[in-house]
Image (tube, helix red, strand yellow):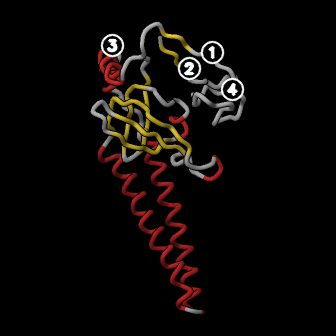
Amino acid sequence: MAVALPVPTCPNCGARNQNDARACAWCGVGIQAAIAPVIRSEPAPSRSQRFRALEAHPAFPELLAHRPSTEGLTRVGLFEAFGSMIGVGLVVMITLYFLSINPVMALFPAAMGVFLFVRMLRSFDRASSTKRDGMLAVPVVVLERREVAPRDDSSDATRWRALLERDDGTRREFKVPDSVARSIATGDIGVAYVAAGYLAGFRRVDV
């Protein structure tokens, strides 16, 4: 006999929260504190068995063929790039100002400018690679979904991370847009749609 805790679903926005959540991570509405456990008469299936069941699911071929839009990820990359570009411009002006006063004082803003410039190039590359390389559909299980920055201190695409594991045991962490993060929970299995280090979508299968 196995005991499993169901994933708490917010009654207000429908987001899937962690098992120990007392309030929704998205809208803040309280979640029922006591959730009745699900009692299974049979042992919980192993990870390998769940992947075999996923591959045998009637919807699996359709899920592998599906591709969500990459426009949102492209916009995120361009937004980050332009933000870094503005930062570079401001740092250049600050550096020039300090150069006129004391060249040593200009070292710190100059170093910051180099950092922002590299970040800008990476953001442009990520935006272009999303279109160039396309998107992969990968069967995975969600090992962890975590918040890495407060709601007010991070962009929509960098607030969440998800650690995904493939059938062969390979693990990788992806950045997750808020709209996707609310639909996944630890232990979910299904098909992940990934591109340029982002989890662009996820289709959960109950197996």
Decide if residue 74 is in sight here.
Answer: yes
- What's the amino acid at mark 3? Pro
Callouts 2 and 1 close, C-beta under 8 Å: yes
Q: Count the labels in the image.
A: 4
Question: Decide: marks 1, 4 in contact (CB < 8 A)?
Answer: no
Q: Is residue 55 above or below residue 90?
A: above
Q: In this view, does 116 lie to the left or right of 36?
A: left
User: In the image, which is nearer the foreground, mark 1 or mark 4?
Assistant: 1
Of pointers 2 and 4, the one earlier in the residue sequence: 2
Q: According to the image, label 3 marks what residue?
A: 58
User: Which numbered disc flags the more N-terminal residue, 3 or 1?
Assistant: 1
Task: Mark 4 or mark 3: name the one nearer the start of the chain.
Answer: 4
Considering the numbered disc 4 on the image, is that residue within a helix, a strand or a loop? loop
* Residue located at (39% from left, 30% from top): 141
Residue identifier under label 4:
31
Q: Where is residue 192 in the image (x, y as percent from the top left)?
A: 39, 32
* For the residues bearing labels 4 and 3, Cβ distance under 8 angstroms: no
Q: Which mark is residue 36?
A: 1
Residue position for label 2 = 6
